Amino acid sequence: MAESFHTVSVADGSRSPNPSATADGTDKNSRLKAVLKTWKVYFQWQVLVTGGAGYIGSVTVELLRSSGEVPIVLDNLSRGHQEAVSPDVKFYQGDIADRELVLQIARENEIDACIHFAAYAYVGESVENPAIYFENNATKAAVLFGSLIEADVRRIVFSSTCATYGEPKQIPISEDHSQWPANPYGWSKLFVEQILSSYDKAYDLKFVALRYFKRGWCSRKSRRTSRS
Ligand SMILES: NC(=O)c1ccc[n+]([C@@H]2O[C@H](COP(=O)([O-])OP(=O)(O)OC[C@H]3O[C@@H](n4cnc5c(N)ncnc54)[C@H](O)[C@@H]3O)[C@@H](O)[C@H]2O)c1
């Protein structure tokens, strides 16, 4: 997996005993933390959230806003709901494969990063109709990443899936467990991880792939609850 761009580990100086304490009693990590916090006042992250009108995306948009960041949503509403996105959030209705639209979004906003949720996400449907999964999830993702690189957006959080692991060889499944999906949905996501990995080496596109299992939450604002 590519290098994470999260600042969490950079700012985490809360170890004990503290290896970075200096002779005069000051703590380099604490000072770094303070500087990063100060920067935060001036530098909000503008984050393009694809699929931001969907189930996980819409709650992520709320969480970004409550953390002081600026989410910008791109969703074609094929499976999402515009009312799940606050009217205060910039919303672009369109497809992730619409290169002109993505470049326009990048021109109109200073995008720092993209959280990529937009995809079809049903295992059963992917078995019955794999073509739409490979096209929407993998092919269109490649087009999106190409547009983002053209716009010089090189930080991506990719909403992958535990389905990339396939049948587990051991439980619990560790992050470095072999990946051999058992269905087209899982393959479509694994292809995207491979695309990102190649683009990291070739184009310096940094990414993290979240291979999560069951997710569940309830958003007070949207009143949506887990369907796991
Ligand atoms: N729901 C889960 O349990 C789960 C678990 C692991 C990973 N994921 C992944 O997380 C992501 C979000 O899942 P979800 O449950 O919120 O799905 P969802 O269907 O609720 O949301 C997906 C959103 O993407 C939009 N979309 C789809 N194709 C698009 C395209 N080509 N262009 C623009 N917008 C498009 C849809 O309109 C929808 O709003 C998916 O990538 C899914 O594979 C989901």
Image (cartoon, grey):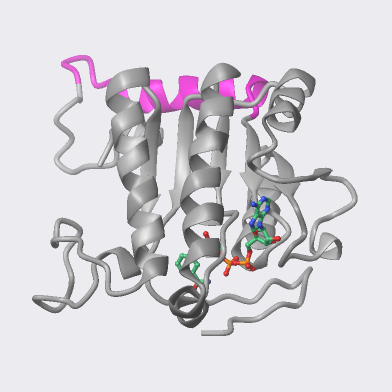
Magenta stretch contains residue 125: no
Query: Which portion, as a residue range, is magenta?
Result: 22-44
Classify 16 as above or below 36: below
Classify 42 as above or below 17: above
Q: Is residue 116 left or right of residue 97?
A: left
Q: Main secondary structure of the magenta part?
A: helix
Rendered location of residue 61, percent (x, y) = 68, 52
Q: Which residue is drawn at 56% across and 54% down?
A: 136
Q: Is residue 27 visible?
A: no
Point out the residue furthest to the right here: 87
Rendered location of residue 28, percent (x, y) = 29, 20
Q: Is residue 70 visible?
A: yes
Q: Which residue is drawn at 37% across and 72% down?
A: 213
The quadrant in which residue 67 appears is top right
Q: Is residue 171 left or right of residue 186?
A: left
Q: In this view, does 149 lie to the left or right of 95?
A: left
Classify 3 as above or below 132: above
Which of 79 and 228 lies nearest the eye of the viewer?
79
The quadrant in which residue 74 appears is top right
